[in-house]
Amino acid sequence: MSAEETHHASTEVAARVERRWATIAVIIVVMMAGLAAFAGIHRATMPQPRVETIDPSRIHLSGEFVESNLGSVLEANGTVTVRAIGQQYSFTPACILVPADTPITLRATSADVVHGILIQATNVNTMLVPGYISEQLMRFTKTGDYLMPCQEFCSFGHEGMWGKVKVIDKTEFANRAKGGGRLSCVGQ
Amino acid sequence: MSTRDLFTLRNTHFRIGVGITAAILIVTAIAGFIVLPFAQPWVQFANVWDAICSAAGVTQRAPDVTAPQQAKRLSEVVLTSNTLSRPSQEAIGRGATLAQRCAICHGPTGVSRADSPNLAGQYAAVIYKQLHDFRSGARSNAVMSPFAVNLTDQEIADLSNYYAYLPRLPAYHPTPQLPKPNIVIYGAPMRGIAPCGACHGSLDNKTGSPWLEGQSEAYMKAQLQAFATSERRNDISQQMRNIARAMTAQEIEAAAAYYASQPPDVVKAVD
Amino acid sequence: MLVNRKLILAHFWLAFAVFGVALTLGAWQMFIRSPIGTWLSNPELYYRSLTAHGTVMGYVFPTLVAMGFGYAISEAALQQRLVGVRWAWAGFWLIVAGSIMAVIPIALGRASVLYTFYPPLIGNVFYYLGVVLVVVGSWIWVALMSVNLRVWRKANPGAPVPLAMFANVAGSYLWAWTAVGAALELLLQIIPVAAGLKATIDAGLARVFFSWTLHAIVYFWLMPTYIAYYTIVPRAIGGRIYSDSMARISFILFLVVAMPIGMHHTFADPQVGAGFKFIHSAFTALVALPTLLTVFTICASVEIAARLRGGRGMFGWISALPWDNPMMLALAFSFVMLGFGGAGGLINMSYQLDASIHNTQWITGHFHLIFGGAIVIMYFAIAYDLWPHLTGRELIDVRLIRTQLWLWFVGMIVTTFPWHWVGILGMPRRMAYFDFGDPAIAPQALSVILSAIGGFILLASGIMFIVILARGMRAPQIDAGPYRFALAVHQPKTVPVALNTHALWVALMIGLTLTNYGYPILNLALSSGTSVPAVYVGAQ
């Protein structure tokens, strides 16, 4: 073989190996994207389906985030809706009460700046952006107390913005819900 | 080859580059806008168009919800960083005239000899909000409410601007300056209490929160206790009740005593 | 051929000086919020420091490195004096002016809004104007890179653009376009409010604009590192680039897909539609492709070097590598950190897993490992490699250099691994202090202490780095010879026009930005009632 032919042959080999690797890389990438889509369908962790807006400076005047409507409510279909707001530097209600083993919809918004709700030891995690309503589905399997820190810098008191979530037994929650109104574990 | 030869279907790289990009875009768009929305049994869409619009993020106003009746009257004040415009000299003058009625309790210089709040140099938004709340009944006080009931919006704004304009004088409660208690410096993070100064002026001012240095100890203690028991509830969306409820009785006393002993000059000029 | 050494040295020195300051702040932050620090009586100091650390490390330091390195590449790879030296100095001084303008309000506590801005929080207007000046200064560099390449092309019609310059210009275009997002946020939204011309701002739209910049900026930071992988490492260890065209394809892929993926930063945001989140998630998966290709090509290039040095066997060649060569060491460390960081990144990018770590300390751990680790360690290596050519003096103490690289690697691992862990436990980001005495978070205390120790190891390493470079300015003079870049095994004689020019790929980048960002931005910009009152921080 001449030098030129050797050169040519080695280029061919190099290109073939390279193509093989590129194919593997593409397969990895496609699998990852596919896995994400699959998990989106089979696990209830899809991002919220709609974009809803609200005026943060007026949420206390009317609409779904007035003070008397904040907290947890047992809906007719057996699910629970929790409404909460974040503001400098607390969540209202400061302690959220929910039942175990129940589909829960969290609807929350911010009254001033950007905050975030993160419930530790769960994958409940959403931003609160003023002007928009955040919605997240959640379901707790274990009863007990969970910490709910604000996960986004919201100015100088951010380090003191920690809320709580209390998960109680389903029947106990149903009993408490009989009284009507909005439930929370504030002051308990 | 020039760029003209680059952007043509004869160019393999152009065909492959644009083709693959477009294909990925189309596949992911179909998945993201049509397949995934309908794959969620817990969300209902009226039709494909509704699903696409929702997935695209078309903004919708929040649905009207009928909330339970409020048990008591709450604050209806809308307070933002631009609620009060820069005051004119006339506004301050009008406020000064109106303030003569307030002098009996709040002092001729805005500094009270009794346990009424000192108002001299207080943030305008604070006085504005409290007067509105007294007027609407969201906050009530046997002495104060009758004064506020007949004030017009203009008069409330003028009074707020006048008191904000007054110089911050030392208070009439001469106590030795106390060391800062932990609850004031650090708050109590795990109980959801931020440092007091994050809202009340020494670090930053949250619009509507007063600075507290030199206020009457008895007054502050009473207010904290009233917030803690929800007897006072004109703080918008429970912003102060959340804090006061989490404080212990000792912390309330320590915070009130500390602030009462402080001179007003540590407050940042925010307004 | 490095003619404008003073210009390049000025960029590097300023970069490393501000890096030193920001690194010190970073170590202090790690310490003060850990259980071994005492709680700050003024939490604002923490956020002030954090704003300075982020602004310097995110905007000033990597930009200066990319610019200095870019000028060096332009002269050395094209064998051509830099065209527009005066403009280059103008860009440099704009960055100096912008940095000073930004840092004064930060130091005074008037702009403690963090480098990510977070409107409706609004700080002093000069902070934002300073950041804009820094970006404008860097845009001059982008233009110069383009001009220099054009001048070279005229003189060498049809010749393959040297790989280093091809990649360098790709990086500059990527930066030019990705900076537009933050620039729009600053110019259209934040600055009018900070200057008092407007009182409301759409916080959701601002986050979308910022995500446009926030992700691709990482690839801009990454560019010098990847250029070093391809064009410096093989030469420094006595090997060859496995494939020139694969390298070009990797840089092209970065140019095209680094941009339209930023919304994976907004997976948990309420203002972006789920459909766009999915598209961005899928494109984010794509960005793993150029990195996977790079890992292959570089490993193959390194293997070539080992075999040329007499390495044998399936894995035996690894021991034949020049492990005492700082470049080899830096590359190995960089790859290890890139591997771990990349694996973490796959979790962040996926539509679902992100929810468990979004905005926790995991994220901080992740980008410190990628940027501070994999990327910055190659910045060190680039500086060591270039220094003798810039100063005409030898970097004598190779042992010290190796120790410095080891310390950086160990420090970064010790810092970021526990950081990831506490993130999984749900520790939120950016808090001035934590009550580790509380039993609910007490189990995180040990990890946080470890992280803080890692921070000090990094600080020690950073100081050593600056000392080594400073001593290099006084070392005995040598003739370093011409600065060369690595050659490919099969050095191309001709390159297809698509792989020799950027136009097609820049067009695709802009096109994808329009498809992936156009509607979400217009939708929010045209919706009424989404603007909210500004909240001014600190005394005004």
Image: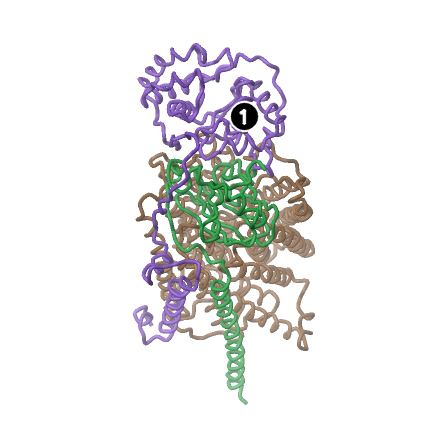
Chain colours: A green, B purple, C brown
Locate residue C478, reporting x and y percent.
61, 56
Query: Relative to residue C245, is residue C477 drawn left or right?
Result: right
Residue nearer the viewer, B159 or C448: B159
Dividing the image into 4 quarters, which one contains the C terminus of chain C?
top left
Judge whether residue C236 can be spotted in this image. Answer: yes
- Rendered view: C34 above or below B43: above
Q: Secondary structure at mark 1?
A: helix
In which image quadrant can residue B234 be found?
top left
Pointer 1 local density, CA inside 10 Å: few below 14, some 14–19, many at least 20: many
Query: Relative to residue A19, is residue C462 drawn left or right?
Result: right
Q: Give the residue displayed 38% in from the left and 32% down from the top.
A: B78
Residue that label 1 marks: B224
Q: Give the residue displayed 38% in from the left and 30% down from the top.
A: B77
Residue nearer the viewer, A73 or C189: A73
Locate residue B63, reporting x and y percent.
36, 47
- Rendered view: B124 above or below C54: above
- Rendered view: C114 above or below B38: above
Locate residue B136, reporting x and y percent.
38, 25
Q: Chain of mark 1?
A: B
Locate residue C217, reporting x and y percent.
47, 54
Judge whether residue C382 can be spotted in this image. Answer: no
Query: Relative to residue C359, is residue C494 drawn left or right?
Result: left
Q: Mark 1: which amino acid?
A: Leu
**Total numbered labels placed on residues in the image:** 1
Residue nearer the viewer, C250 or B154: B154
Residue occupying the far bottom of the picture:
A1
